Image (spheres, rainbow, N blue to C red):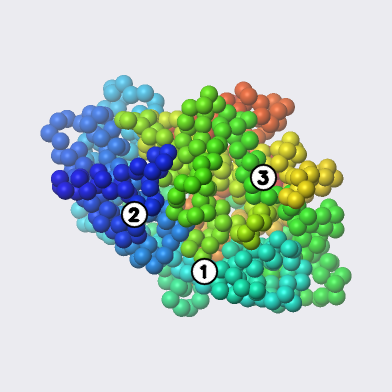
Amino acid sequence: MQNIKADLSTHPLVNWNGPLGLPDFRAFSDADFAPVFDAALAAHEVEVEAIAESPESATVENTLVALELAGDALSKVSAIFWCRAGAHTNDTIRALERDISPRMARHVSAIFMNAALFARIDALYEKRASLGLDAESDRVLEKTWKRFVRGGAKLGPDAKERLAKINEELAGLGATFGQNVLADESSWALFLDEADLAGLSDALKSAMAEAAEGRGEAGRYAATLSRSIVEPFLSSSERRDLREKVFEAFTRRGENGGETDNGDVVRRTLELRTEKARLLGYDTFAALKLDDTMAKTPQAVQELLQPVWRKAREKAAEDEKELARLAAAEGHNHAIAPWDWRYYAEKRRAERFAFDESALKPYLALENVVAACFDVANRLFGLTFEEQVGIAAWHEDVRTFLVRNAEGSSRGVFLADYFNRPSKRSGAWMSALQSGYKLGAGKSPIIYNVMNFAKPPKGRPALLSMDEARTLFHEFGHALHGLLSDVTWPSIAGTAVSRDFVELPSQLYEHWFTVPQVLEKFAVHVDTGEPMPKELLEKMLAARTFDAGFATVEFTASALVDMAFHSLAEAPEDPLGFEAQTLAELEMPDAIAMRHRTPQFLHVFAGDGYSAGYYSYMWSEVLDADAFRAFEEAGDPFDPETAEKLRRHIYSAGGSADPEELYTAFRGRLPTPEAMMEKKGLA
């Protein structure tokens, strides 16, 4: 074991000696990950065993603190590896991901099922009232005890062994699911020529030209399966046959009957999840997952989703008639198909508000939207962001920012990876190379955002759609949740909160994008620098809830199918058949598809992060709509007193208290759904 410690103490995957406390990404290769994982796993096992077998009686210091601080080397190599696996993968990383995912699951299971270790945690938990703990420490002890119980600590030997095998297999299935989706996304492209581009904006043509060149087809245009290309293509291409091809390819990712088909992966995943729930004493996997959330029960989730679903479906039905009218005016008598909706919705937007999405893009340059994110963070929380040029990261596109507090002290580091590439999985996300906490020597946060915006040609700025600009604000809201973390314990730092609370800081931050004084300052023309004309700004703000029925049906259908899968006592033999049956029972409109169909539903099947939890975006939307009203009631979107309460109780608090307590401390009460329904245009 001495050699392991020596190796880990000097290896750049663990000994981070790059600028700003970052790892030096130039100092290691893909081949280094496997041996460092081996050493780090072994080192963590030794640390855990030393805690479990200590001859001293359990104390907070020698058990809970020691456990929280153990495994630092494993945390470091894991953080870099999972960043690479999502944002810049290759064959070597993918192969190791398939191997390390089940190994990590096995390792974690062994910790939670360590009888001697649980006995020490259990002893502390039983006498916690007499330990004199502060509120945060008491919560950490309670959450740790519950994690052990849900991890199988109280099961008999045979059940423990079975649960460990289930967790191991689920981890491997999650890795396979994500890799299959990425393989389908990166391998498919529809190459087009100038004659095929009728209706497309210059910005979209440029992005498609860049995508084609990157795939060895210089001089042509590629419609890829990046959402940043798919959605504008479906919104603007006059070629219905091409819209259908792109839509079908996009919605059939992971469903091709070949090596990357996810049908069996989903079926087996659902089987194992239901078995896991039964082993742990729950009727369904949804009941297990919701036990430690704000919602608490599947019934509470349904009580939120069903009324919204009914209103959204009614609104979408009204809107579909309008789209059919526009199609008929062009001489088409076909029903509105899913590949038609965005196209005719854009025409309807232009008719109703006298502008279309392409008119906004020149005023939404990526650099300006990033600057707006930073400016809002400065006005609310006093943060400043200083770009550091020349620091190597996992890809040359990654940008690095030193984050400072209002008085100039260092707050942390923020990294941003904005552009789509074949080596990156789809979507947008926030994660941490390192969380910020104060236990032991403490650590400052190193937070990153990953996006999939279309990369413009060299020398030209990236232009965003309204949805993309909101997405950037959304993920930056998550980043602030990590950067502003001000807690003692690592396990509750930053975004380590219940799944249906974690989206509050991100969705709330979206509100500031459409604050008029923010748009007036940053929505300036990319070429002239002129601010967005007042008339266009007013139209854009008036159109905020345009097509709300469509957007809400898309999302809510996915949330309801997710909940339906995981509320079953027995997994379905045919998951895609069950998806179709569930949508039929919901009376899903034929003209709209789920935002995430089952074979590509990464939130739910590439790991279990949002399994039985996709509803949480809407749960948090109830919170964020009500939370922003606090600023409206104060008469100032940057009201200092409200901002300070927001920082203290939401953005900085991590999981230090129950979410209901944190929200009530900020707002003075719990929210009601009315503000959310108004925000969505469904009231």
Foreground label between 3 and 1: 3
> Relative to the observer, which residue lies in front, 589 or 326?
326
Q: Earlier in the sequence, mark 2 or mark 1?
A: 2
Residue labelled with disc 2: 28
The residue sitting at 52% across, 54% down in the picture is 397
Residue 679's quadrant in the figure? top right
The residue sitting at 39% across, 39% down in the picture is 21
| Residue 658 shows in the view | no
Name which residue type carries label 2: Phe
Q: Is residue 1 left or right of residue 427?
A: left
Residue 433's quadrant in the figure? top left
Name which residue type carries label 1: Ser
Q: Which mark is residue 186?
A: 1
Q: Is residue 271 left or right of residue 423?
A: left
Q: Residues within 10 Å of mark 3 (few under 14, many from 20)?
A: many
Residue labelled with disc 3: 368
Q: Is residue 535 left or right of residue 241?
A: right
Given contact means CB atoms under 8 Å apart, are the residues at marks 3 and 1 in contact?
no
Distance from the alpha carbon under mark 2 to that under mark 1: 26 Å
Q: Position of residue 58 (x, y in %)?
A: 20, 31
Q: Residues within 10 Å of mark 2 (few under 14, many from 20)?
A: few
Secondary structure at numbered mark 1: helix
Secondary structure at numbered mark 3: helix
Q: Earlier in the sequence, mark 3 or mark 1?
A: 1
The residue sitting at 15% across, 45% down in the picture is 2
Residue 414 versus residue 428 in the image, above or below:
above
Q: Position of residue 473 (x, y in %)?
A: 61, 44
Name which residue type carries label 3: Asn
Secondary structure at numbered mark 2: loop
Q: Position of residue 384 (x, y in %)?
A: 56, 33
The residue sitting at 26% across, 49% down in the picture is 40
